[in-house]
Image: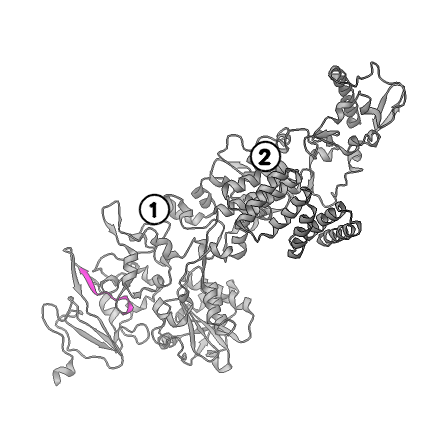
């Protein structure tokens, strides 16, 4: 049922690195699948920042500008992604060409709790070798040093996209899974079926409290909103049975069986109605079939007990009553 | 004591009532009150208290004539009785009620006044309520929560207070069955599915639906506390500021469903809780020419996207909001920052604030570079050469389509020039290490990043050496040949 309510809306090719260039996430010099250049940059800390592929590690290289809102966002969110992923075979590095802004970066990183190393790209050497087009640019490189994905700029779904790309580069997702990760679906709610479900749920709550009349009103509202709602019809039939309005219940169950001959709940209710109609053999047969279908075992055993009791088969009746009790006890929280 | 007094008084009244009604009954009540011990089962059969049983549903002890389950004789001679237990203890002796975790107890239960809601002998349902329905009972003490309101919650309208509230006690405030959103999603199952499966969930939905909805009724659709937009903006202050100060308003924000034209109120798979992909959303309106109040036309963006194979990055990413302030603004075309709408503009960094939000501004500041751009002849930065001019700088739009074109790097096929609707062709062609242009603006030029094409010094110190001339500019090497 659910799949009918989902509509795939985003072009799945967004996920495919091969089409990234066509979709705007690209570099001028290095293309997807090509090795990224080796580099060793001075950093804000003591340790130089270099290409980790020699260490067989994947890399998220975040090229940022100083005092740029989108750069601060990608720094914070990529750091968060890295912390959440907790992978030793992945490194996150930050690089900037704004080398005169070292103190600004230092303050920002301290304030935002960013621990990844920050390389300083004097004279934009790495910038040019990679062919950065916009800032910020996030570059995902696999453990073999090949450019896997590029995210140009910042979008509100940045961290979701980066997480998927990083997992893909680490081999945690294959191409198909990556595509699924990046595919977004629209949600079509408040359909007649949704509204009917609300009435049905309310009816369930009310019935639990013994408010049968109000529960019935809710179920009738559900059927008004969605006349095809089989479950509401069966809930209503169940209420009718409880109120000993067997003819009404029978009509409802017959409607359901006509629309959905395989309905398991309808079969059980039909069995119950046959019992109330005094057709004990038919009831026995239908309820026994229903028991196999495992719709509501406690109730089915109980009614089979009633059938056998009425047929004078006390032992069988007692066995079914025992089973019914056992099921009820099993279901207790 | 109060309970027993009330019960005794009630019993007395019943006796009188039965006596008055007795004329129509076969069993006549005795003329005088009995002065001897009465067997428990005979209170009702004797005719005195027959009406006690006169209910669609009778209380268990009443049904079996076990009056002494609750009443005990004080004086047989005076025919007076007392309750066997005080206040709520009488009821709770049989009706076990687990209240040890309860933080909220309904006031009548707290004070032992079970009879303010229940008839001890019978009622129309098994709840033995003193009113026709639970809601009628509740409204005897609680003010009407939906009178005159246009939008009423289903259970409230149906009088099903008990769908959300426990009548006796609860672990939650307001005697609610469960806490926060959990209560709501018991019925709102599709919203639950949405919250469970979607990536982005609206903050308040994670905690309490009543942040936006009145649980009973309101004068706004969906029982919202305020009108849609006002409600959203009551939290989203930065957006409120944009909307309030916008000199150009975006119809998407001000018409129809307002904020809900684009956003889901609860959850979505799309960032910013959008209803769908941003481009799809924008194209719901911008799939046709739109006439502006000033008479100008906004292009049919669907057609623009469809015809261009080279998309500007944000367009390719489906991120219209990277350049446009969706909620309204003061810049040309609702752009988030300044961007010159003309073909020519004196170069000022501020005029290109929009472009420099993403592109390094040094791309038009540095005359020489080998890193910043591929549009260079050797290390001569041709972006700098075109744009960075005191008077007639060429703006980005002179060469680039903002959204999409059929040429690499979304370069235009032709450029609009002058006021006469002229379109000058660019004839850009990408080559291995560079490219060439043959625009109407100047004579044809080539550029090469590795082996710069050397041209003789221009007649004028601008990029327009061919202005007023015809034919292509000849590279120096070619002339030597």
Q: Circle 2 sits on which residue?
A: B159
Quarter of the view holding residue A42: bottom left
Quarter of the view holding residue A137: bottom left
Q: Circle 1 sits on which residue?
A: B251
Q: Is B409 one of the magenta-colored residues?
A: yes
Say whether mark 2 and mark 1 are on the same chain. yes
Tell me if residue A299 comes above or below residue A25 in the rendering. Answer: above
**Farthest-out residue, bottom:** B481
- Residue at image coords 35%, 67%: A24
Q: Which mark is residue A178?
A: none
Residue B402 can be seen, yes or no: no
- What's drawn in magenta, residue-wise? B408-416
* Subunit bearing disc 1: B
**Farthest-out residue, left:** B469
Q: Is A272 one of the magenta-colored residues?
A: no
Quarter of the view holding residue B340: bottom left
- Residue at image coords 38%, 48%: B242
Q: Nearer the viewer, mark 1 or mark 2?
A: 2
> Label 1's element?
helix
């Amino acid at each position: 049922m659910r799949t009918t309510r989902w509509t795939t809306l985003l072009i799945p090719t967004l996920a495919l690195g091969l089409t990234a260039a066509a979709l705007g996430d690209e570099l001028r010099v290095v293309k997807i699948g090509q090795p990224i250049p080796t580099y060793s940059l001075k950093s804000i800390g003591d340790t130089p920042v270099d290409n980790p592929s020699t260490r067989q590690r994947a890399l998220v290289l975040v090229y940022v500008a100083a005092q740029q809102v989108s750069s601060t966002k990608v720094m914070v969110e990529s750091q968060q992604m890295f912390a959440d992923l907790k992978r030793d075979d992945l490194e996150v590095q930050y690089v900037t060409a704004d080398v005169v802004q070292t103190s600004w970066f230092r303050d920002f990183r301290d304030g935002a709790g960013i621990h990844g190393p920050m390389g300083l790209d004097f004279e934009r050497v790495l910038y040019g070798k990679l062919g950065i087009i916009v800032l910020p640019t996030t570059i995902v490189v696999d453990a073999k040093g090949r450019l896997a994905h590029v995210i140009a700029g910042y979008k509100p779904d940045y961290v979701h996209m980066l997480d998927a790309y990083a997992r893909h580069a680490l081999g945690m997702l294959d191409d198909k899974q990556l595509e699924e990760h990046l595919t977004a679906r629209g949600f079509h709610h408040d359909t007649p079926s949704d509204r009917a479900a609300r009435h049905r749920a309310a009816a369930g709550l009310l019935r639990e409290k013994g408010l049968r009349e109000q529960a019935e009103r809710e179920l009738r509202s559900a059927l008004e909103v969605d006349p095809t709602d089989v479950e509401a019809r069966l809930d209503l039939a169940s209420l009718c049975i409880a109120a000993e309005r067997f003819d009404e219940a029978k009509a409802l169950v017959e409607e359901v069986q006509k629309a959905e001959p395989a309905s398991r709940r309808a079969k059980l209710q039909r069995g119950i109605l046959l019992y109330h109609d005094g057709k004990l053999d038919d009831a026995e047969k239908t309820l026994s079939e229903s028991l196999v279908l495992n719709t509501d075992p406690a109730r089915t055993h109980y009614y089979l007990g009633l059938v056998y009791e009425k047929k004078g088969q006390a032992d069988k009746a007692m066995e079914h009553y025992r089973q019914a009790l056992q099921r009820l006890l099993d279901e207790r929280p | 004591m109060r309970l027993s007094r009330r019960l005794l008084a009630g019993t007395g009244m019943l006796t009188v009532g039965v006596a008055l009604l007795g004329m129509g009954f076969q069993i006549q009540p005795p003329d005088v009150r009995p002065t001897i011990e009465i067997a428990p089962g005979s209170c009702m059969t004797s005719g005195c208290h027959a009406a006690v049983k006169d209910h669609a549903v009778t209380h268990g002890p009443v049904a079996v004539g076990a009056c002494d389950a609750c009443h005990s004789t004080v004086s047989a001679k005076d025919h007076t009785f007392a309750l066997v237990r005080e206040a709520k203890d009488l009821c709770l002796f049989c009706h076990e009620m687990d209240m040890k975790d309860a933080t909220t107890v309904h006031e009548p239960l707290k004070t032992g006044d079970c009879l303010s809601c229940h008839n001890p002998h019978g009622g129309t349902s098994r709840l033995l309520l003193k009113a026709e329905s639970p809601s009628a009972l509740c409204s005897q003490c609680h003010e009407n929560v939906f009178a005159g309101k246009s939008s009423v919650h289903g259970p409230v309208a149906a009088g099903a207070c008990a769908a959300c509230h426990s009548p006796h006690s609860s672990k939650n405030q307001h005697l609610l069955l469960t806490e926060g959103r959990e209560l709501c999603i018991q019925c709102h199952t599709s919203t639950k599915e949405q919250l469970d499966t979607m990536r982005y969930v609206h903050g308040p939905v994670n905690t309490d639906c009543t942040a936006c909805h009145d649980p009973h009724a309101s004068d706004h659709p969906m029982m919202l506390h305020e009108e849609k937009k006002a409600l959203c903006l009551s939290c989203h202050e930065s957006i409120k500021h944009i909307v309030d100060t916008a000199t150009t308003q975006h119809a998407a924000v001000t018409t129809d469903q307002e904020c809900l034209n684009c956003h889901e109120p609860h959850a979505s798979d799309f960032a910013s809780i959008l209803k769908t992909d941003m481009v799809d959303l924008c194209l719901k309106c911008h799939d046709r020419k739109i006439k502006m109040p000033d008479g100008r036309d906004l292009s049919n963006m669907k057609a623009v996207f469809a015809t261009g194979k080279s998309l500007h990055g944000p367009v390719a990413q489906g991120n219209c909001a990277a350049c446009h302030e969706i909620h309204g603004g003061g810049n040309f075309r609702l752009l988030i920052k300044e961007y010159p709408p003309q073909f020519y503009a004196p170069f000022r960094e501020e005029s290109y604030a929009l472009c420099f939000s993403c592109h390094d501004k040094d791309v038009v500041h540095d005359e020489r570079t080998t890193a910043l751009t591929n549009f260079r002849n050797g290390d001569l930065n041709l972006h700098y050469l075109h744009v960075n001019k005191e008077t007639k700088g060429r703006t980005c739009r002179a060469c680039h389509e903002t959204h999409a074109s059929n040429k690499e790097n979304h370069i235009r096929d032709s450029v609009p020039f002058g006021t006469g609707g002229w379109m000058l062709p660019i004839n850009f062609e990408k080559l291995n290490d560079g490219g060439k242009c043959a625009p109407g603006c100047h004579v044809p030029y080539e550029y090469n990043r590795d082996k710069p094409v050397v041209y003789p010094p221009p007649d004028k110190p601008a990029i327009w050496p061919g202005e007023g001339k015809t034919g292509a500019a000849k590279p120096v090497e070619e002339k030597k040949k």
